[in-house]
Amino acid sequence: MRCVLALCVALQVPAAGQSTKVEQVAWLAGCWEDSTAQRTVEEQWMAPRGRTMLGAGRTTRGDTLVEYEMVLIREQGGQLAYQAHPSGQPSAVFLSRAVSENEVVFENLQHDFPQRVGYRRDGDSLRAWIEGPRNGQIRRVEFRYRRVACGVNH
């Protein structure tokens, strides 16, 4: 929990009456990859258009698809909504808790796991994470992406 509290101090929470726009997370656009000998995790984000960003992700082991997810980031009630459609699971919506020029955190405390989804960009690297309670403990899973060319096998 300390990690989340420190994060809230570093991020900007919009003042009352100030709307968060999808363009504030345009830095997420592009293709990102986290690859090890065991698996490859990819995310591809389209640039903002029509007050939305569309993202697709997949995890593969060798030539086998392990899981995939479609995501829509859209403006909703002055916040950003992260609408996730993961393979084999029901859809879930997480609302932006804080947004800055290089970091965003979405939260849904009614969801089982994860309850928070975050992204932080640093140049050509992107750290993503999911976290929340699991078996009575707070669990955090991180992905350390690097920018890659879109549409090219690596």
Image (cartoon, rainbow, N blue to C red):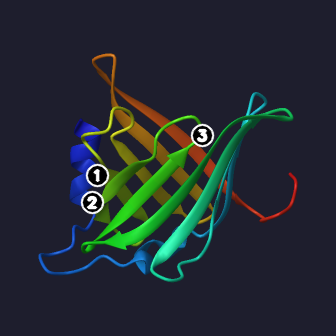
Helix, strand or loop at label 2? It is helix
Question: Dots 2 and 1: beta carbons under 8 Å?
Answer: yes
Residue type at tag 2: Ala
Closer to us: mark 1 or mark 3?
3
Q: CA distance from mark 2 to mark 1?
A: 5 Å
Please give left or right for residue 45 compared with residue 66 in the image.
Answer: left
The x and y percentages for residue 126 are 56, 56
Please give left or right for residue 107 compared with residue 14 in the image.
Answer: right
Residue drawn where x is 79% and y is 30% of the image: 37
In front: 77, or 6?
A: 77
Q: CA distance from mark 1 to mark 3?
A: 29 Å
Residue drawn where x is 52% and y is 71% of the image: 53
Q: Residues within 10 Å of mark 3 (few under 14, many from 20)?
A: few
In front: 52, or 116?
A: 52
Helix, strand or loop at label 1? It is helix
**Residue that badge 3 annotates:** 87
Q: CA distance from mark 2 to mark 3?
A: 33 Å
Sequence-first tag of 2 and 3 = 2
Q: What numbered label is drawn on residue 7?
A: 1
Figure quadrant of residue 144: top right
Q: Can you say whether 5 is above or below 12 in the image?
A: above
